[in-house]
Image (cartoon, rainbow, N blue to C red):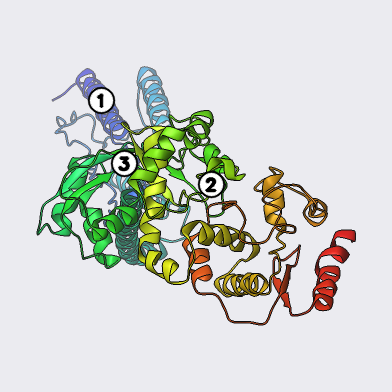
Amino acid sequence: MVDKETTEFSRGSFKEKILRQLEENAAKQAETKFPDPEDFERPSRSDSEEPERKIEPRKVDLEPFKLPVFDFPAADENEGEPFVENENLPEEGDSLRQNLDGVVSEEIQSQDIPPQFSRSEPKVQDEKIEQEQFLEKKESEKMVKHQPSRRTNSPSKKTSLSKKNKNKNKNKNKNKNKKKKKVTAGKIIAVIVVLLVLVVGGTGWYGYNFVKSGIQPLDSKNATAKSINIPAGSSSKQIGEILQRQSIIKNGMVFQYYTKFKNYSEFKSGYYNLAPNMSLSTIASKLEEGGTEKPVAPTLGKILVPEGYTLTQIAKAVTVNSGSNEKNAKTPFSEADFMKTVQDPTFIAKMVKAYPKLFASLPTKDSGIKYQLEGYLFPATYDYTKSSTVESVIENMIQAANTQLTPYYDTIAQKNLTVNEVLSLAALVEKEANNDDDRRNVAGTFYNRMNAGMTLGSNLSILYAEGKLGEKTSLSEDANIDTNLDSPYNLYTNTGFGPGPVDSPSLSSIKAVLDPSQNDYFYFVADVTTGKVYFAKTLAEQNANVQKYVNDKISS
């Protein structure tokens, strides 16, 4: 038998157990938390190539709530009625139940669980709770699975698009790689081509400048010559090495190929006076002419005596170093020393003795001659050395004249002419004509006039007597000369060849005098503007030519 107090105590403990069980279940439910869809990370664009991870929702298995079963003591015999929950409870029990229901309802509301609970229906309530939790999990899974994407609207589309995008990305990457490879290969080829062009262009430019520089003189301002010995049997390569070693040329190899290209091959041995201001062509030409057996003093410069120069003009020429590229380069000789020497009787006697055939007919000083040595200095280019003097320079010019006339001495004697007569007539021919044909015709006309007893009638001799020959004169001065001048050089009043030459004639004029043209002319006149010579047989023709080619052009 269990008394009423025992029964009430058992009921109280039963409620406390139920309360504890509900609190534990509520705590378990509070700890169980479904995954938040926002916690799942979306794949970044950079990871688009990696396979898409499928997010599986975490399942939480909840054990169904089971009410504990208690063995209550049998009811008192006096109490034969079964236990009813809402019957015969004391007021304290009712208040306790109300408190219990209030606590449970608060816990259920805080956990979003339906607050309905009945001891008589515990299993049904648990099933409802489980169904609701299951539905909530499904909804959460849907929320996770159907989370909207920025790119796609559905998981299936996202998967297919991701695959397509993956394939596209792979194709794009392949195309990009191919394009990159092509671009890289193209760049490499372009760089190689540019490098080759630069190398070839640079080599050509360097070679061109190298050859161009090697052809030019080593020092265009240095006319100091050296005596260079070229041994017999030397090749162009060996000669180039010698000249480069002696500081005459820039590069021996350039000399070798230059002479082969220009077909210089007949080089002769001997001693040569060569200067750094000489070009390769000048040096090669000298090597073909031949050197001397013994060394000759090197030249310091050159003196140029043009054809038809008078002694006063030659005196000025000897002061100019024509072998230098510098403007107004001078020689160590003066004009005054030159004129003094050519008029020195001692020097003239010395020359007459040294060259007897040349000076056999030299006019005497009292014959009315202006300068005895006028016309006896041959026009040419002369070298001078450190040991050269004015006398040696003049003697070289006289020696050259003797050398040029030596082949013609016999011819002069056969024609009953003297060297002075030949030089005198050749000096006039030199000034009156410009080419060999005109020279021979002029010489023939002079012979015709002398053979006819006429004077030579040359204006040149009068200009020379007046000191104007070789000077700049106007056409009017040339045409209006004083034909009545009292001078041995007045060939309008004096017959014959004149006292002596009025300038230094060329070899061509000398040959023209020794071999004149056979013609019927007695007159000639040169056009004052063109220099062309017009010949005439009669005085009337001559006057017409003078009026046409001289007077009319002077007046205009």
Q: Nearer the viewer, mark 3 or mark 2?
A: 2
In what quadrant of the picture does the C terminus appear?
bottom right
- Rate crowding at label 1 as few (under 14), some (14 to 19) or many (20 or more) other CA atoms within 10 Å: few
306 up-or-down from 394: above or below: below
Tell which of 196 and 49 is nearer to you.
196
14 up-or-down from 497: above or below: above
Disc 1 marks a residue whose amino acid type is Arg
Q: Residue at x 57, y 75 (%)?
A: 437
Q: Return the disc, 1 or 2, that comes first in the chain's sequence.
A: 1
Residue at the far right in the pictured view:
555
CA separation in Å, label 3 and label 1: 127 Å
For residue 374, which numbered disc appears in the image? 2
Q: Return the disc, 3 or 1, that comes first in the chain's sequence.
A: 1
Disc 3 marks a residue whose amino acid type is Pro
Tell which of 192 and 312 is nearer to you.
312
- Rate crowding at label 2 as few (under 14), some (14 to 19) or many (20 or more) other CA atoms within 10 Å: many
Q: Nearer the viewer, mark 3 or mark 1?
A: 3
| Quarter of the rendering containing residue 516 | bottom right
Q: Residue at x 73, y 73 (%)?
A: 523
Image coordinates for residue 168, horizontal then vertical, percent? 36, 66
The residue beneath circle 1 is: 20
Disc 2 marks a residue whose amino acid type is Glu
The residue beneath circle 3 is: 276
Q: Secondary structure at mark 1?
A: helix
Image coordinates for residue 545, horizontal then vertical, percent? 81, 73
Q: Return the disc, 3 or 2, that comes first in the chain's sequence.
A: 3
Tell which of 227 and 252 is nearer to you.
227
Q: Secondary structure at mark 2?
A: loop
Q: Secondary structure at mark 3?
A: loop
Q: Is residue 181 left or right of residue 149?
A: left
Residue 117 visible in the current orientation = no
Image coordinates for residue 479, horizontal then vertical, percent? 80, 57
